[in-house]
Image (tube, grey):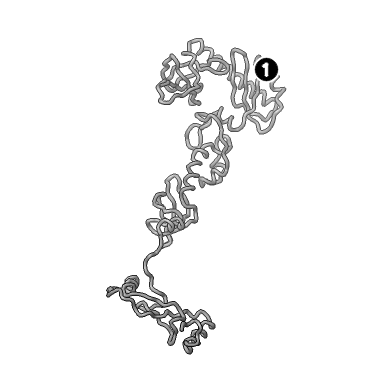
Amino acid sequence: MPMMCAVTFSPRGRLFYADPGQYAPKIGDKVLFPTDAGPEVAECMWAPQWVSEDIGGLPVLVGMAQTADIERRAVSRRRRAEARVAAKRLIREHELPMKVVGVDYIQTDSIFTIYFSADHRVDFRALVRDLARTLGARIDLRQLSARDSARIQGGIGSCGRDLCCATFLTDFEPVTIRMAKDQDLPLNPMKISGACGRLMCCLRYEHPLYEQFKAEVPAVGARVSTPEGDGRVVSHDVPRDQVMVKLDAGGGRSACSRASVCGSRKAYDAAHSGPDTTALPDPTAGPGGTADAEAGSSPADSPVIHRSLTVSSRVHSADGGIATSVGTQPMTSVPAAASPDNARTRRRLRRQATHPQRDPDVPS
């Protein structure tokens, strides 16, 4: 299994992971970390230890820092402080809308890299000439975005912890106002903006969780069935994994867990309702299962109901009464009365009742 350690170039700064190689530094020891400008002195924050996964591509420590390396680091720090003071003074003299964010110094090549932030493009050609003459070295000015400026300067976020971009973030992912809306956060720039003035990077951390939660639970306004009764979803509480439901009975609100909500009304009915096989009473039939036909109605005028006593008893039981089955012999065929939907139907029924033998539909 490979070994890995973590180092930093500044107190409470970003951690850089490396392969200790043949060295075994302890926490607080000074080591040489490889960079593009050569080995730099860094402090070990995480002692080497075995890791279960094979992590390839990590830089290997050059070695332990010696006294000469530490003295060179002190000289570099002093030169960076001088360059920062000179840059701020000359910016004021030239009246440029710039803000110095950070200074880097490469001692071997005598190059100062000054990072600044500005709202617009700045013509700093005169500033570069004055800085080169004052510091006696080559000057490189680089303009940074708001997020990169916060990363270099560091700071404390609204959560009370060090800024994510200054500690562990390696790149910036896009953050949109839609993410704040999906998480039901107030659209107040003071509450959803970070130290850089842009939307907080942490809005993206929990956004996939909110998307998954809303895809699995009923939407706001959907009808649901809960252990406390039916109701309507009024809000979601993703951190607690709950759904707020306004109950139909009494109008109270109930906080239900995701597991106790049976989904939308349509999904609940589809899962729990099946074909009804219970014999229902005929709407035109009497208590005994027979229909009250009009006087003189012909058997051929409407469908004939053939029921048994057993069926009649089952209908009584469905109505809530108590009946005893007395056999399975069929009852007398009794015509069911046709429902007189309109005046034409009523006149036809009266005509058939008066002259049943003249109805051509009656078999001879």
Residue 47 visible in the picture: no
Q: Quadrant of residue 21?
A: top left
Residue farthest along the top direction in this orientation: 68
Q: Position of residue 333 (x, y in %)?
A: 38, 79
Residue 109 against residue 85 in the figure, above or below: above
Q: Position of residue 264 (x, y in %)?
A: 46, 55
Residue farthest along the front direction in this orientation: 364
Classed neighbour count for the residue bearing mark 1: other residues with Cα under 10 Å, few (<14), some (14–19), many (≥20): some
Check the picture and name the quadrant holding the N terminus.
Answer: top left
Given residues 89 and 164, the one toward you in this image is: 164
Q: Residue at x 65, y 15 (%)?
A: 137
Residue 15 against residue 110 in the figure, above or below: below
Q: Left or right of 218: which side holds 120?
A: right
For the image, the number of numbered tags is 1
Q: Amino acid at mark 1?
A: Ala
Residue 98 against residue 302 in the figure, above or below: above
Given residues 230 and 160, the one toward you in this image is: 230
User: Circle 1 is placed at which residue position?
Assistant: 132
Residue 34 against residue 13 in the figure, above or below: above
Given residues 8 and 123, the one toward you in this image is: 8
Secondary structure of the residue carrying numbered label 1: helix
Q: Residue at x 48, y 37 (%)?
A: 159
Q: Position of residue 261 (x, y in %)?
A: 41, 53
Q: Left or right of 20: which side holds 328?
A: left
Residue 362 visible in the picture: yes
Q: Position of residue 155 (x, y in %)?
A: 52, 31
Q: Left or right of 194: which side holds 125?
A: right
Given residues 95 and 340, the one toward you in this image is: 340
